[in-house]
Image (spheres, rainbow, N blue to C red):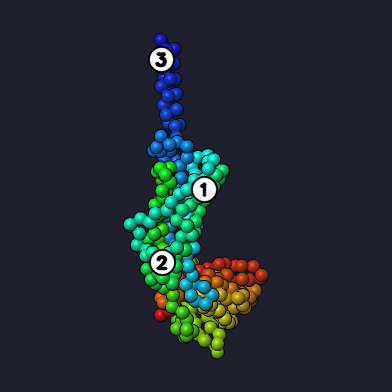
Amino acid sequence: MKKIIRYLLIFVIGGAFLSACESPESAWDKMFNDYNKSNPTYYVQFTQSTGFFQTAIDDDGNPKNIILPIGVKLLGAPQASDVTVTLVKDNSSTIADNMYTLSSSTITIPAGETAGSVTLTALAAEMVENDTVKLVLNMDAGGAEATAANQIDYSLKRIKFCPLADPNDLVGSWSGTDSEGNASQVVTFLDGDKFMIDGLNIGWMTGYWGEVIVTQTPLVMIMNPNGTLEIEEQDYLSTTWNGAPQPKYSLSATGNWDNCTKIMVINYDLHQGGDVLISITENITLK
């Protein structure tokens, strides 16, 4: 009797163990379980079905088109003949027809291959500044549409860009914090035709790092017409710690300026002895 009970316990415990070890049904399994079993050869889905994309600015300050691939892939073995997928604009789209082009309204997956694509171009010049529109595309794969990733839903935005016609527009004192939590002490000014910046890193240097600044040299900052900025590595600070002079510091940076909102984001490296001591981002607004 004890043996029978013991075997029954082993059976029950073993069954419970197997049940506990069974993996839950994955999203991939669910997708296949939902397929139309009358057409099991292959299914088609979009490679990237959702996304948010913004225009950029070229070197002259003009908006750049958004150019994206729209790809499809086979779920299943490569086919002996071409597979054609037709793209159909959904009524929920808010983008006007003149705001975009497709290199083709059909995507072909060549025989023997498993993927194909066309090119979407959102025409920045036709889009409204600071406005987001949606492009929704359905696929017609002749009944072979997968139950997931079978619709494109892209949000497309033309950013608002205010050219820096007069550098004085971004001259003054700035407020904000850096990525180390220090309050900004940044000031910008013009020195002839040079855009100058001073005050980067001062809060960190005198606070957390605890060194005394002896000399501080304003830095030349290049304000590119496309909304980017850069500081080529330049000598910046000399300091002491406990009265002893320290190796001098230099600084280099990249970032962005926004003349519409009067915001700058500056990603800078503080160098000492040929190495980067610390990298900090300063996110600041003109007062």
Return the residue at label 2: 99
User: What crowding class fits label 3: few (fewer than 14 Cα within 10 Å), some (14-19), or many (20 or more)?
Assistant: few
Inspect this view and state whether residue 204 appears. no
Inspect this view and state whether residue 166 appears. yes
Looking at the image, residue 104 lies above or below residue 83 = below
Q: Residue 281 carries which label?
A: none
Where residue 152 appears, as percent x and y from the top left, is 41, 54
- Residue furthest to the top in view is 1
Residue at image x 44%, y 32%? 22
- Quarter of the picture containing the C terminus is bottom left
What's the amino acid at mark 2? Met
Please name which of the two marks, 2 or 3, marks the residue nearer to the observer. Answer: 2
Looking at the image, residue 16 lies above or below residue 238 = above
- Residue furthest to the front in view is 81
Return the residue at label 1: 109
Return the residue at label 3: 5
Give the distance between the C-alpha atoms of the residues marked 1 and 2, in whole angstroms: 27 Å
User: What crowding class fits label 2: few (fewer than 14 Cα within 10 Å), some (14-19), or many (20 or more)?
Assistant: some
261 or 79, which is in the foreground?
79
Looking at the image, residue 259 lies above or below residue 55 = below
Where residue 172 appears, as percent x and y from the top left, is 45, 83
Where residue 105 appears, as percent x and y from the top left, is 45, 56
User: Looking at the image, is mark 2 or mark 3 earlier in the sequence?
Assistant: 3
User: Looking at the image, is mark 1 or mark 3 earlier in the sequence?
Assistant: 3
User: What crowding class fits label 1: few (fewer than 14 Cα within 10 Å), some (14-19), or many (20 or more)?
Assistant: many
14 or 56, which is in the foreground?
56
Residue at image x 53%, y 70%? 267
Please name which of the two marks, 1 or 3, marks the residue nearer to the observer. Answer: 1
